[in-house]
Image: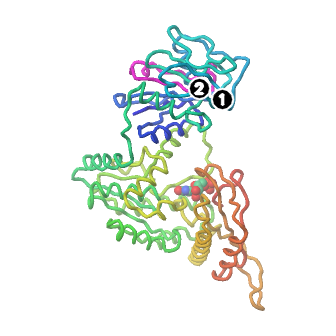
Amino acid sequence: KVLIIDYGSQYTQLLARRIREMEIYSEVAPHDAEITNLEDITAIILSGGPKSVNDKDALEIPDWIFKLDVPILGICYGMQALAKKLGGKVEKTEVSEYGKTIIKVSNNVLFSEIPEKIITWMSHGDSVVALPEGSEIIATTYNGINAAVKFSEKIYGIQFHPEVKHTEFGFEILENFLIKIAKLEKNWSLENLIENKIKEIKETVGNSKAIIALSGGVDSSVAAVLVHKAIGEQLKAVFVNHGLMRLNEEIEVKKIFNELLGINLTVVDAQKRFLSKLSGVTDPEKKRKIIGEEFIRVFENEATNEYEFLVQGTIYSDVIESAASGKNTAKIKSHHNVGGLPEDMKFKIIEPLRNLFKDEVREVGKLLGIPEHILYRHPFPGPGLAIRIIGEITEEKLNILKKADHIFIETLKEFNWYNKVWQAFTVLTPIKSVGVVGDERSYDYVLAIRSVDSVEGMTADWSKIPFEILEKASSRIVNEVNGVGRVVYDITSKPPATIEWE
Ligand code: XMP
């Protein structure tokens, strides 16, 4: 595999994606990670980063990287760190280069079949001003800055970012490094990955049994189907119906898994249990805690010690995020994912999607025959509708919210807007307001519609849904859902608001 060592560039994940798109497997590791499987590494890329190599706390390149004796490509900060480490000099120069910069390349394999002048994307204030012995400049900018260096037959550096689309021939340059210099073969594909994973899971599980908690979401669904392909009935798939799901969700999930995918789903009906624990609770964090704990209690009943393995739908962004967090992340909300279990449950963990990006997970799901409307559905929080009913949760309010939510989503789909937004839902407020229905005065709940555009949910903007869609959803909701007297649209971005209301 190609190991990308991350020095903090915003483009590192993009780089990994680009390389996988070339059918070569790549992974990202934080710069201070302890790397164990050294034999697997066939090439190393050192990413860019925000620091200067001359800062006191600059991140250095560890020695083991050179001992491996595999080809190395340093990008931006990576190139400067290489230059410094190998005995060259990096300094802040008069010219900083940000954005599009034309470079002139020389005749080198790294630039084979690439025009002499290309536009590249740069972002640097420091430059390599003196080369280590035996190195050679292989590209320069018109400002006279070293844009690429050959440090040795196997070690190269480039000052620009080949992974961004603004760099002309960027992918070709990466390919030249990986194929012509590192001599890697293009043989990675999701089809192969599925085949290998199935083999691997079969071997790992052997005659034992595994269990998975399904949430109805994309990741756990794909993980379940993949593991089921490997070990069939040795997998027990559990769906805890806490009653806080979307309208008819439990029926739909059951149908899809049982009928379409041939997986014998165990549905645990725990609605009463959850509702009675939640009765009278209004604090959002308390709600989350109760649901998390209750979920574990229910799951414990199912996960007897007959099961040696626990399957989880962890995906690559979860892995990267949890590696990056812990340092200085403030707790904004406790994000409890259904499936997060206490440490004293002694399972061996299987995470078949651990190395995949979200769109790759969807692609795997498609290859495994999971319907697209499951693969492309909006994210849904673990605590479900409990955090979309502000204040106390009652069965009556749950029913109102389920119906209203269903109408809103149906309307978005009708106008082909469902896939244009990242997440859409409704929120039931505890406020009642006055209206007129026929000749009578009414006094019913205010319901909010929320729809956001986002990439990973970290930041979000409210969706600019056309008025006619909002109009239709609003009029259907007040007409068809008893108990809702007024509909409002939430036009707040995140930050400062969060996506969910609680
Ligand atoms: P916020 O509201 O924090 O939401 O802007 C960001 C994304 O996370 C989802 N979310 C949760 N997911 N457990 C989850 O599994 C939770 O407690 C939780 N709270 C929010 C939210 O739906 C959005 O997609």
| Numbered tag placed on residue 123 in the rendering | 1
Q: Residue furthest top?
A: 133
The amino acid on which the numbered mark 2 sits, given as a three-letter code, is: Cys
| Point 60% across, 58% down: residue | 422
Crowd rating for badge 2 (residues with CA inside 10 Å; few <14, some 14–19, many 20+):
many
Q: What kind of element bears circle 1?
A: strand
Q: Is residue 293 left or right of residue 466?
A: left
Q: Pointer 2: what residue?
A: 76
Q: Residue furthest left?
A: 207
Give the answer, above or below, for where 150 lies relative to 172. Answer: above
Q: Which quarter of the image is occupied by the N terminus? A: top left
Q: Please indicate, yes or no, whether residue 430 appears anywhere in the rendered image.
A: no
The amino acid on which the numbered mark 1 sits, given as a three-letter code, is: Ser
Q: Is residue 43 magenta?
A: no
| Point 38% across, 37% down: residue | 186
Q: Position of residue 244 (x, y in %)?
A: 52, 68
Crowd rating for badge 1 (residues with CA inside 10 Å; few <14, some 14–19, many 20+):
some
Is the C-beta separation of discs 1 and 2 under 8 Å?
Answer: yes
Q: Which residues are magenta?
A: 51-77
Main SS of residues in magenta: loop
| Numbered tag placed on residue 227 in the rendering | none
The quadrant where residue 75 appears: top right
Q: Is residue 57 magenta?
A: yes
